[in-house]
Image (spheres, helix red, strand yellow):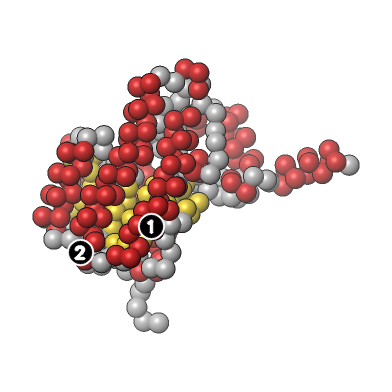
Amino acid sequence: MSKNLFDLTGKVAIVTGASRGLGQSFARAVAVAGADLVVTARDLESLKEFQKEIELLGRKVLPLALDVREHNSIEKMVDEAYRHYGKIDILVNNAGCNIRKPAVDITWDDWNLVLDTNLRGAFFVAQAVAKKMIPKHYGRIINIGSATCVFGYAGIAPYCASRGGIKQLTMSLADDWGTYGITVNCLAPGWFKTDQTKALWENKEWMDYITSRLPLRRLGEAADLDGTVVFLASDASGYITGQTLLVDGGFTTGATKANIKKAIANVE
């Protein structure tokens, strides 16, 4: 087969939440694969240095302001992106937030902030982009979830609820828009160091515990996600939709050699 199924040359990708962390990593990966970009953040100033980096790769990049909690902001961003490029081929639906508190301390406003950003915002960004994709009968929508799409974790109840919702939303939208040639999948990272999780990295006991639970015995690095986001954005994944693809070093297997040995010892 001569065609490079992973080549994104000529494609236009929107990456939300691209001012830092994994959002920038996703944007960089699809740009290296050939795509031109729309990158978003609430603060346009925070995108300036990254815009220069992408332009040095020889790619076009349009920075746009976006607050996913505001419907008008979503509609304006998508309309400007479409007006600029004349199409949108790929959406990496990444913008998100988290609040770490015991469940009994979560406030009404805490809940709304996380769910409005991670779930409601993700839906309405996908909806606005899909309206541009449907007439062209082509699109790749990648919702960014996490391992909490499939397991619960104490201290982040709203976040877990929002990520579980992303998994279900992904399946629903895949069924809704598949007839238009649009695939919708969820990329679910495990433990990666980001601004949201950096406090955990300062806790050696936590680090040792999590690492012991990983079959690959190491925490994730941003580059570990590059191949997956390019795969889901490319023609290589053309017959895959409605799926949640976990990139977690095996964390969600739920068992490690140490755990198995302990369990066997207890049985014996």
Label 2: few (<14), some (14–19) or many (≥20) C-alpha neighbours in 10 Å:
few
**Considering only vertical position in the picture, is 15 above or below 5?**
above
Labelled pair 1, 2 in contact (Cβ < 8 Å): no
Residue 6 appearing in the image: no
**Please, what is the three-letter code of the amino acid marked with disc 2?**
Pro
Nearer to us in this view, 161 or 200: 161
Give x and y (percent) for residue 206: 58, 31
Q: Is residue 68 left or right of residue 178?
A: left
- For marks 1 and 2, the one nearer the N-term is 2
Q: What residue is shown at x 14% (from left), y 59% (from top)?
A: 85
**Considering only vertical position in the picture, is 226 above or below 209?**
below
Label 1: few (<14), some (14–19) or many (≥20) C-alpha neighbours in 10 Å:
many
Disc 2 designates what residue? 135
Q: Quadrant of the C terminus?
A: top right
Corner quadrant of residue 264: top right
**Considering only vertical position in the picture, is 155 above or below 171?**
above
Q: What residue is shown at x 40% (from left), y 47% (from top)?
A: 169
Residue 61 appearing in the image: yes
Disc 1 designates what residue? 174
Q: What residue is shown at x 16% (from left), y 52% (from top)?
A: 81
Q: Is residue 1 left or right of residue 266?
A: left
For the view shown, which residue lies furthest in the bottom direction?
A: 1
Q: Residue 257 carries which label?
A: none
Q: What residue is shown at x 55% (from left), y 40% (from top)?
A: 151
Q: Is residue 50 left or right of residue 103?
A: left
Give x and y (percent) for residue 179: 33, 65
Give x and y (percent) for residue 53: 23, 50
